[in-house]
Image (cartoon, rainbow, N blue to C red):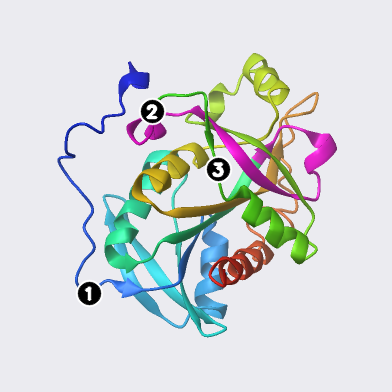
Amino acid sequence: MITDTFDNSSPAIINPVVKPDAVGVDACIITFSYEIEQQVAQRYASGEIASLWCATGRTPVYLIEKNGKRFAFYKTYVGAPITTGLIEDATMELKCAKFILFGGAGCLDKAIAHGRVMVPTEAYRDEGTSYHYAPASDYITVPNAHVVAAFMRRNGIPYVLGKTWTTDSFYRETQNNFEKRKAEGCISVEMECAGVQAMCAFRGLALYAFFTGGDLLDAPEWDERGKNYRTGGQHDVGHFDIALALADFVTGR
């Protein structure tokens, strides 16, 4: 069964190994938005410092410099397996132990998350990747949630803390499962957090995650919320500004 997949008693067949010419950075920022990637490449980046490769093609890694610090940035793909795998790859190309992950997520509670950044405290493991990195459990804790929340408070950014539901299949977010997760305190649904957090804990990396509201599930009918996706939605480059300031904050600790 998938819940029996975690194995720390035998060696992995393939292991990520830091390359001799790996580039040192203070933190790495990861998004899912192709529009934010374009804006960052044009307005913030001082060049490319690495490439991540898989069958879907090349993922460029950009360098951003702020306050005397060096940050890497790249766009990942949707889903826990590829997002987790690319971070594993990034640890070979970069000397880096802190990762900022941000992107859109479905909102499960219209009363508390509207207009606020969602900071995950725990992730429900309704996916497969995390079971290869951590013993089976319903939830995995996101230990740096309090750090992200402290940053939001210091900068006056409206936010809400809560659990998140990580799923592999957005077309199978059924009404019954939505009600169960909401009753347990989940305020968002996305596809990566549980897997990425499990991998980071396994590898000794620090993850700092936040989500912005995308579609709304807590409504009589599904609300796509797609009309103003460039202003306030997951493609709003303003959320990269938050991520960059958060990277500066956590590397100053």
- How many numbered marks appear? 3
Q: Is residue 183 left or right of residue 220?
A: left
Mark drawn on residue 135: 2
Q: Circle 2 sits in a helix, a strand or a loop, which is it?
A: loop
Indicate the position of residue 140 as horizontal and vertical percent values: 51, 34
The one of 10 and 130 positioned closer to us in this rendering: 10
Which residue is at a point 34% across and 60% down the rendered structure image? 90
Q: Which residue is mark 1?
A: 21
- Foreground disc of the pair 1, 2: 2
Circle nearer the N terminus (3, 1): 1
Which residue is at a point 41% across and 81% down the rendered structure image? 47
Which residue is at a point 62% across and 48% down the rendered structure image? 145
Disc 3 and disc 1 in contact, CB within 8 angstroms: no
Indicate the position of residue 25 as horizontal and vertical percent values: 41, 73
Residue 130 belongs to the span the image colors magenta: yes
Indicate the position of residue 148 as horizontal and vertical percent values: 64, 55
Q: CA distance from mark 2 to mark 3?
A: 15 Å
- Give the amino acid type for the residue marked by disc 1 in the picture: Asp
- Give the amino acid type for the residue marked by disc 2 in the picture: Pro
Q: Is residue 210 left or right of residue 213?
A: left
The one of 213 and 23 positioned closer to us in this rendering: 23
Image quadrant in which the C terminus is located: bottom right
Boundaries of the magenta span: 106-135
Q: Look at the picture and state if 75 lies above or below 5.
A: below
Indicate the position of residue 159 as horizontal and vertical percent values: 76, 51
Q: Circle 3 sits in a helix, a strand or a loop, which is it?
A: loop
Q: From this viewpoint, is residue 209 visible? A: yes
Q: CA distance from mark 3 to mark 1?
A: 31 Å
Mark drawn on residue 142: 3
Q: Quadrant of residue 129?
A: top left
The one of 149 and 106 positioned closer to us in this rendering: 149
